[in-house]
Image (spheres, rainbow, N blue to C red):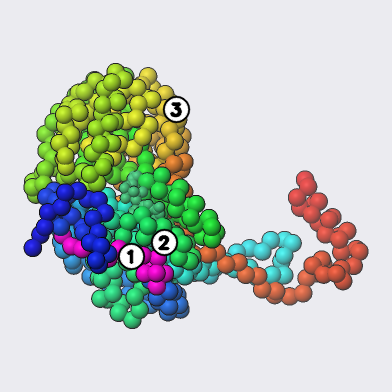
Amino acid sequence: MAQSVDSRGPQTREEDARFPSVDPRTGEVIDYHPMDDEAAVRSAVAAAREAAAWWGGLGFAQRRRRLLSWCSALTQRIDELAGLITMETGKPRDDARLECVLVVAHLDWAARNAERVLRRRRVRSGLLMLQEASTVEYQPYGVIGVIGPWNYPAHTPMGSISYALAAGNAVVFKPSELTPGVGRALAESLAAVVPEYPLLHVVTGFAETGAALCRAGVDKLAFTGSAGTAKKVMAACAQTLTPVVLECGGTDAMLVDSDANLAAAADAAVWGAMANAGQTCVGVERVYVVDEVAQEFTERVVAQTRRLRAGGEPSADLGPITRPSQVEVIRDHLADALARGGTALLGGVESVRPPYVEPVVLADVPETSRAVIEETFGPTLTVHRVANLDDAVARVNAGRYGLGAAVFSAHRGAEIARKLRCGMVAINSVISYAAVPSLPFGGVGDSGFGRVHGAEGLREFARAKAVTRRRFPPAVRVLTFARPAWAMRLLLRIVRVRYGR
Ligand code: NAD
């Protein structure tokens, strides 16, 4: 029977160190989860290490077969997983289904492409080392720690988990305290199709559990969450020189040129900003639109946004703000933007009705306001007029974050994409790169570093191993104390001819 709780804070039941997961739409408890401490995390890492030895030794073909079975099982249970995502995040059912579609598309790609990307391959040895046969291969690290957020509780961690497993690692996953059930469901579904060893361990809890995972001796840690937490994770991992990949937030922009298809641009801006109630790391938070078309573009955006409704019912366009404390951040950003001279074109501070926020569109918001420079993570959009796209690029590149961006332009899309300081750009669409498994995903600056997805994402979870094998004795022996004096003279002569011209 569901119980009500007041907020989504760390309400542990002291007697059994468990915490509830809660439906943000109703405040009802969905389930209780263990508050895993240091010892529990260390024991999960130890068990994962045994699984990693078995899994790493299986080879690409065997791993591919098993991961594709998992992919098929997840695909058959999309509605079940989506239902759980909806319960824990409040997002509309179809948004949750869309998330699951991304999960299986990436898992399938990682499973099918791991061998091609990571297997041993010959590389040229070069003139000076002609006698050597050189190869590079990518070997698994062993155990990867994954710490995830709540906004895409399946897709986001699976962007690391799928690729880490395909590269031959085992994983210990710490889901967000708001979505532990989704994390457990993912692990249970893998265990059902790969019963031999528990490849994916889930540890649940709050910040302390995540911090314990950073200290637990994993071979690499993949973190997705806010830039503030990323700094703590990196500092903790620095103590043991544990490598990290950090996927953090953003204040992503859309740029709209005078020759853009305005209907398509407005549609993309509204969806990019408002889908998942704006709780998307690569969601559109601001639009820079060229003066000549700004009025028409803005009118279209406002007209489309006006039709959207926030609520907990299946027909709602937007769900609740999943993390209660984020509601205050959204309210502050709106109040700050309006106090600094911003104009509300739709909604305003009154749109904040916890746990929901109705969509808000603002104009004339100064570049120094919090809504522009910080991540709002709500269904809000600021629209800025610019003289031209170069002005827009300068403003976008001035920010601390650099995750994704979108450009709508008939002629300058590729040129502008190249100039933007960020990890991904969609030209004449929005967020589409996240659904292309062969593309790397990640940011620059406060948006983090390292890449998940694609070949780069597979290599992120593997160590490059370089090997040389002597094929025949060298004509000029220089790597020895028995080197004759003429050998160095000859070597330098060759080098001067080869490199000194
Ligand atoms: P968060 O930083 O609050 O928490 C992320 C995870 O870190 C949670 O599991 C949390 O329990 C854990 N954690 C907290 N303190 C910790 C510590 N000291 N040591 C170790 N782990 C700790 O972020 P959130 O609110 O869960 O997620 C929202 C953020 O994630 C937004 O900034 C969003 O943009 C970002 N995000 C980024 C991507 C991406 O791919 N770049 C994807 C989704 C979300």
Extreme-bottom residue of the structure: 196
Q: Residues within 10 Å of mark 2 (few under 14, many from 20)?
A: some
Q: Is residue 232 visible from the viewing direction of this image?
A: yes
Which residue in the protein does label 1 denote? 36
Q: Position of residue 308 (x, y in %)?
A: 13, 36
Q: Earlier in the sequence, mark 3 or mark 1?
A: 1
Give the number of the disc on residue 212. 2
Quarter of the image that includes the N terminus: bottom left
Report whether 258 appears left or right of 167.
left
Residue drawn at x 25%, y 59% is 12
Q: Position of residue 264 (x, y in %)?
A: 23, 34
Q: Nearer the viewer, residue 433 or 30?
A: 30
Which residue in the protein does label 3 denote? 394
Which portion, as a residue range, is magenta?
30-43
Q: How many marks?
A: 3
Q: Are marks 3 and 2 in contact (CB under 8 Å)?
A: no
Q: Nearer the viewer, mark 3 or mark 1?
A: 1
Amino acid found under the numbered disc labelled 1:
Asp
Q: Residues within 10 Å of mark 3 (few under 14, many from 20)?
A: few
Quarter of the image that includes the C terminus: top right
Q: Position of residue 9 (x, y in %)?
A: 25, 51
